[in-house]
Amino acid sequence: MAELSDVQNQTLRDEIEEYLERPEEIARFIELFARAKPALQEIAAAIVEGDDAAADRLTVAALEQGIEAIEIMDDGLIGGMGIVGIKFRENFVFVPEVLSCARAMRAGMAHIEPILSAAGVEKHGTVIMGTVKGDLHDIGKNLCIMMLRGSGFDVIDLGVDVAEDAFIDAVEQSGARVLGMSALLTTTMPNMGRTIEAFIDADLRDEVQIMVGGAPVTQEFSDDMGADGYGADALSCVAVAKELMTAVA
Ligand code: B12
């Protein structure tokens, strides 16, 4: 098991020491950053500091060093955002700081996205994605979209705060057979179930396979509300989308 001293980056060591309290989270981040390449630790530190210029510059530099785009995304950009998420939860930082960190993450992602998209080979079909009504969180959804596009899916992005009707209209207009909903708030999670109900009421439930995700969403919740698939992260989102695509083929 890695120790805090195995994390080379001073900023990340300080962040872990100062802000992380739960033993399992401390262990998870020490493990992640101790094995992450130093260049990616620097990117994670730039995200935590909300430094978009550094995130931009360091992401370009890491790509130039030949580090894989997906590794930069997972260990650097998402890794850094993970720390920010915990600090927000524990009230160490507030909305403005989180927005700066999200901006820094987007600055890095701007270089990663085209590479992941270009890497896609075989086409798998169209997926509609949106964050449910009342919910403005889109970082995770956008990551999923990036990974889906990178894996050969065409994606229709409905954005955030998407009402039941808008999901239904998108399915009717595009003919897409797979739909993904994201929710980050416990108060908006029920809107996933309401959207599924709306598809039943519109007699369209059999036309579309529905997957759900977002930090508070679980497999159990997904089963309870009658979704067809659940994914815990962007990689599983791709796996679930492929599975659901096969189901409608
Ligand atoms: C960034 C953030 C914000 C930003 C959002 C910026 C943006 N453009 O998205 C801002 C500052 C605007 C914000 C606002 C609010 N937020 Co906020 N936010 C967060 C934070 C820190 C990180 C979320 C995030 O981006 N995570 C990183 C991404 C990569 O992870 P992810 O979203 O989980 O996505 C991954 C998986 O879940 C999965 N996934 C996601 N979607 C989907 C979909 C499918 C189909 C599949 C298969 C998979 C999948 O794959 C993704 C990639 O791996 C979280 C804390 C946290 N740890 O989650 C709080 C958090 C979600 N927010 C919270 C709250 C309370 C709020 C506010 C109500 C705060 C306020 N008082 O105003 C508002 C609500 C605004 C609204 N109406 O939506 C709470 C929710 C608590 C709860 N129990 O509901 C959290 C948990 C923080 C906390 N502990 O208090 N927030």
Image (cartoon, rainbow, N blue to C red):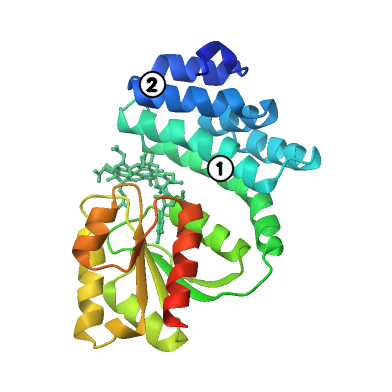
Q: Amino acid at mark 1?
A: Met
Question: Residue 61's x, y, as percent?
Answer: 76, 37
Question: Residue 76's x, y, as percent?
Answer: 59, 36
User: Is residue 26 shown above or below 131?
Assistant: above
Query: In whole angstroms, how far apart are the C-alphas of marks 1 and 2?
Result: 20 Å
Q: CB under 8 Å between callouts 1 and 2?
A: no
Q: Amino acid at mark 2?
A: Leu
Q: What element does badge 1 sit on?
A: helix
In percent of the image, x 52 and y 61: which residue is there? 145
Alpha-carbon neighbours of circle 1 within 10 Å: few (<14), some, or many (≥20)?
Answer: many
Question: Residue 192's x, y, as percent?
Answer: 26, 65
| Residue 245 visible, this orientation | yes
Residues 97 and 183: in front is 183
User: Is residue 164 shown above or below 68?
Assistant: below
Q: What element does badge 2 sit on?
A: loop
Dividing the picture into quarters, in which one does residue 197 lie? bottom left
In percent of the image, x 52 and y 40: which residue is there? 78
Question: Residue 86's x, y, as percent?
Answer: 37, 31
Q: Which mark is residue 113?
A: none
In percent of the image, x 58 and y 15: which residue is there? 6
Give the foreground label among 1 and 2. 2
Residues 223 and 176: in front is 223
Dividing the picture into quarters, in which one does residue 8 lie? top right
Dividing the picture into quarters, in which one does residue 77 lie? top right
Alpha-carbon neighbours of circle 2 within 10 Å: few (<14), some, or many (≥20)?
Answer: some
Residue marked by disc 1: 105
Q: Which mark is residue 20?
A: 2
Residues 141 and 137: in front is 141
Is the shortest distance between ligand 1 and the CB of mark 2 under 8 Å? Answer: no
